[in-house]
Image: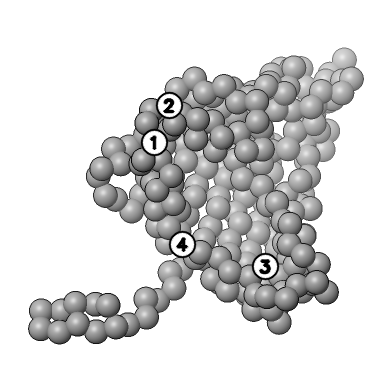
Amino acid sequence: MVVFDDKASFTTIPISKPETNQSVFAADIAIGANGNARLVGKITFTGDEDVYFRDIMSSEDDQGKKEIMIKWLGEFSPDIALTSYTLPNFEEITDTTAISFDCSATNYASLSHNRLFLNPGFYFRVNFRGEKPERRTTSVYYSNPHIYTSRISYLLPEGYNIEAIPPPVEIENEFGRYSLSVQLNKDRLLFDREFRINQKVIPLAQYKEYYDFMRQCEKTDNQKVICKRQR
């Protein structure tokens, strides 16, 4: 219901665009020769992503907020030790929230003989668990279209060289887009990924296409960087 000076009327709220609802993870991550990592970075939430994060955090005390931060950062690397973090004043209403953090992760990269195996996607990974198309009976519903972005600069351990990195990838259709770039720049590995959902509803008639898209994104997202120790 929209209220004007002299009247009120009911209207349908338009669906927001993906650019309105974003989660952007940016960090510098230093990898040790033992596979442990130190992370310093920032996550920025806008639109519905901001509303969701605020709803979770605003009712918690300091200890609860810290536990949520550890869980949030450690979803795909559970051995997280949070050194410090900064949060905004949740009483101030804004459409953007930025949080900074400094933490460490044990065994973030897997060590095997003279190689380190690293999944460079720290904060967000495509983790699709939808039914096979022949078993699906309903459409797919999202809260809103959205974009998840990760921009990470990895400092590789001294004495290691890159043996293999995932090739650049771009997967796109009308309801979503996934792009990945992993590049070596001197002693740093630059990881840039974007995952976008364009529609609030994926109709059942499009589920097979959606299923194939998500499975392809998940497979790409789980590729590893291989670092080999110099002799």
User: What residue is rendered at 32% in x and 82% in y?
Assistant: 11
Mark 4, residue position: 19
Vertically, is 142 above or below 202? Answer: above
N-terminal of the pair, mark 3 or mark 2, is 2
Task: Point out residue 171 in the picture as x, y percentages from the top left corner.
Answer: 70, 63
User: Which class describes the residues within 10 Å of circle 2: few (<14), some (14-19), or many (20+)?
Assistant: few
Cβ atoms under marks 3 and 1 closer than 8 Å: no
Q: Earlier in the sequence, mark 4 or mark 2?
A: 4
Q: Residue at x 69, y 44 (%)?
A: 182
Q: Earlier in the sequence, mark 4 or mark 1?
A: 4
Q: In which quarter of the image is residue 162?
A: top right
Front residue of this view, candidates 103 and 188? 103
> Which circle, 3 or 2, is nearer the viewer?
2
- Quickly name the residue at label 3: 172
Q: How far apart are marks 1 and 2 (CA)?
A: 8 Å
- Which is more toward the observer, 71 or 146? 71
Q: Give the x, y percent position of residue 178.
A: 65, 59
From mark 3 to mark 1, how far is it between C-alphas?
Answer: 39 Å
Which amino acid lies under the numbered mark 3 shown in the image of this protein?
Glu
Q: Image check: 103 left or right of 212?
A: left
Which amino acid lies under the numbered mark 4 shown in the image of this protein? Answer: Glu
Mark carried by residue 60: 1
Quick check: 59 left or right of 215?
A: left
Q: Mark 2 points at which residue?
A: 63
Q: In this view, does 21 lie above or below 11?
A: above
> Can residue 182 be seen here?
yes
Task: Pick whichever of labels 4 and 3 is earlier in the sequence.
Answer: 4
